[in-house]
Image (cartoon, rainbow, N blue to C red):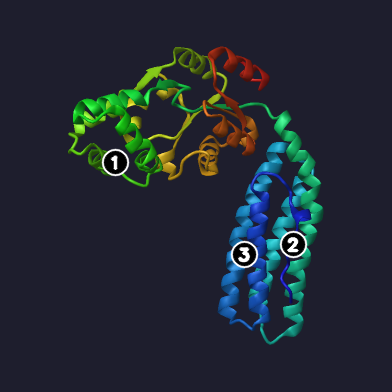
Amino acid sequence: MAHIQWKDRYNIGYKDIDAQHKVLLTLLNDLIDLIDQDGTPEAVSGIFQRLCSYALTHFANEERYLKAAGYPGLSGQESSHADFVHQLLVFNQAFDPADPRLLEETRSFLKDWYLDHILKSDMDYVSCVKRYYSEAAIKAVLFDFGNVVCQFDNARFLEGLASLCGRPTEDLKVALYQQSTLTQDYEAGRIDSMAFREGVSALCGMDLPEADFIRVYTHIFTPIESTFELIRKLKPRYQLGLLSNTSPWHLEHAIQTTDVFPLFDSVTLSFKVGANKPDPRLFEDALSKLGLMAEECVYIDDRQAFAQAATAHLMHGITYTTPAALMADLGRAKVAI
């Protein structure tokens, strides 16, 4: 039996639904291939189990989105999802490579359910979930750290390094930020603190003492008092989150020492997630910790590209420029202050 080919008209265009549908399609095609090629019952059963497991994950995500959006057809979706998983288990239990009738019934069910479900049942909820973006009440405000909660100045780090090793700051700037990926690797968790210090030491041409290195590396932040005040005002009404590209030593010696750090309900940091913004895994980590939908969250970042990435993930992304502009943007996002 020919593979089911993905077509543009199958696109839902909402969140990660299309990506999950494509994974389901791959698993369905793998199962159809095994059936057509007289695969062993053990191999077919393995695909059935993988398909069931992934379908359950996908259905749970989809139903969470529909529930949050108030979709009136949620119960029908839940029933259809349960029927699909039940039928998969029935076919898995009854699978017999010597029974052509059962094989054809299995193939037809897989193809017909998949196409019918996406083109009819899933398409029915698209307008509802997309409308939710403009209708959702904001329940959380998330902040980037650098240049949103605290200003930072890497020139201070370079000047501190220069004072330790004697190399010109401009040479160090080029070596560290243009000819090296040490900072990105450290913030993405690809190297640890010791490896970062050793890498920078090599660029400086000397072994930088740990205590001195930490001091010059972390003393680059200055509180933005207007943001501190904003966080305190928002705390009684909203969940608060911190979502930042940062490193273990910045966390330990700068971020955690700020007065407002204890006010955050969730903290998502690049080195812990293992990726840097704008990777969507950071946004998903924050949403998971808060237990909220993206549409219910505002995210503030000084980098326009990162604020736009949050918006693409269906958060309400705001680019921080000035305190006054931020207050106006929050007002447009219907955040009460």
Neighbour tally class for label 1: few under 14, some 14-19, many 20 plus, Cα within 10 Å: some
User: Which residue bears the numbered disc 2?
Assistant: 114
- Which one is nearer the viewer's eye here, 167 or 45? 167
Which one is earlier in the sequence, the residue at label 3 or at label 2? 3
For the question of whether residue 215 can be seen, the reply is: no
The amino acid type found where label 1 is placed reads Phe
Give the structural element (helix, strand or loop) at label 3: helix
* Apparent side of residue 330 relative to residue 132 in the rendered image (left or right): left
Residue 115 % position (x, y): 78, 61
- Which one is nearer the viewer's eye here, 120 or 144? 144
Quadrant placement of the C terminus? top right
Which one is earlier in the sequence, the residue at label 1 or at label 3? 3
User: Which residue bears the numbered disc 3?
Assistant: 51
Quarter-of-image position of residue 128: top right
- Mark 1 or 3: in front is 1
Give the structural element (helix, strand or loop) at label 2: helix
Give the structural element (helix, strand or loop) at label 1: helix
Against 58, is 44 above or below? below
- Mark 2 or 1: in front is 1
In three-dimensional space, the C-alpha distance between marks 1 and 3, rounded to whole angstroms, equals: 42 Å
Residue 157 % position (x, y): 31, 27
Please give the name of the residue rendered at 27% of the width and 44% of the height, measured from the top-left corner. 195
In three-dimensional space, the C-alpha distance between marks 2 and 1, rounded to whole angstroms, equals: 49 Å
Against 274, is 291 above or below? above
Please give the name of the residue rendered at 20% of the width and 29% of the height, measured from the top-left corner. 166
The amino acid type found where label 2 is placed reads Tyr
